[in-house]
């Protein structure tokens, strides 16, 4: 069984990935993989290369959980994916080690993290709903203001019923033809 120590990090645009020799390291690593910090979580070529490189018994060393993903859900999925490959995952900043040979402990920690992620989602949705309700009360939510007043709508319908040209009506009321037809559509 191989036991390589592998470093993964995300670098900023100010510290390019080309200069891997100068990365701050606490140990000597057998391999180093990196991605740009600006990369989307789904387009992480360095992370995918790392996962393909890994073998049973390897240890992946990462500065922080935020280096791997931007959400707790993605982090849990990735930890499971690495543990399934029988790899140990070490987070330096959080001082956490997920060992592939302690599966019960890892699964318990991941389950707790998933519950926290669900709690965060529910809290976010609740805050969003509260914000939307407050915006509706202020009249700031629910689409654009009506282009025409009730009196203008009555006038528009009357003129359209009299056979007036629709394009001319739209110009007169300063609305698009599509909006005009929406007003004329029977409710």
Image (cartoon, rainbow, N blue to C red):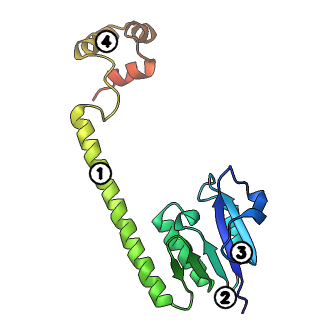
Q: Is residue 9 above or below residue 58?
A: above
Q: Is residue 30 left or right of residue 122?
A: right
Q: Is residue 82 left or right of residue 121?
A: right
Quarter of the rendering containing residue 33: bottom right
Helix, strand or loop at label 4? It is: helix
Could you give the CA–CA distance between mark 2 and mark 3, rounded to whole angstroms?
A: 14 Å
> x, y percentage for residue 20?
76, 63
| Of the pair 46 and 139, the residue shown nearer to us | 46
Helix, strand or loop at label 1? It is: helix
Residue tagged by mark 4? 156
- Circle 4 residues within 10 Å: few <14, some 14–19, many ≥20: many
Q: Is residue 51 visible?
A: no
Residue tagged by mark 1? 127
Residue tagged by mark 2? 57
> Mark 4 or mark 3, which is nearer the start of the sequence?
3
In the current view of this chain or complex, which residue is farthest to the left?
Answer: 137
> x, y percentage for residue 60?
64, 77
| Of the pair 103 and 168, the residue shown nearer to us | 103
> Mark 2 or mark 1, which is nearer the start of the sequence?
2
Could you give the CA–CA distance between mark 3 and mark 1, rounded to whole angstroms?
A: 40 Å
> Mark 3 or mark 2, which is nearer the start of the sequence?
3
Residue tagged by mark 3? 52
Q: Is residue 68 left or right of residue 173?
A: right
> Mark 1 or mark 3, which is nearer the start of the sequence?
3
Helix, strand or loop at label 2? It is: loop
Could you give the CA–CA distance between mark 4 and mark 2, rounded to whole angstroms?
A: 76 Å
């Amino acid at each position: 069984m191989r036991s390589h120590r592998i470093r993964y990090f995300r670098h900023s645009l100010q510290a390019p990935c080309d200069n891997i020799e100068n990365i701050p390291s606490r140990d000597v690593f057998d391999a180093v993989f990196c991605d740009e910090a600006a990369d989307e979580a789904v387009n992480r070529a360095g992370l995918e290369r790392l996962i393909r490189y890994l073998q049973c018994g390897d240890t992946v060393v990462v500065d922080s959980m935020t280096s791997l993903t931007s959400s707790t859900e993605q982090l849990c999925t990735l930890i499971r994916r690495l543990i399934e490959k029988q790899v140990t995952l070490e987070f330096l900043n959080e001082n956490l080690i997920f060992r592939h040979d302690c599966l019960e402990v890892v699964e318990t920690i991941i389950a707790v993290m998933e519950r926290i992620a669900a709690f965060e989602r529910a809290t976010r949705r609740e805050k969003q709903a509260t914000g939307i309700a407050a915006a509706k009360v202020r009249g700031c939510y629910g689409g654009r203001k009506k282009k025409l007043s009730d009196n203008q709508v009555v006038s528009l319908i009357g003129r359209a019923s009299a056979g007036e040209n629709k394009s001319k009506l739209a110009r007169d009321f300063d609305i698009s033809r599509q909006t005009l037809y929406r007003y004329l559509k029977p409710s």
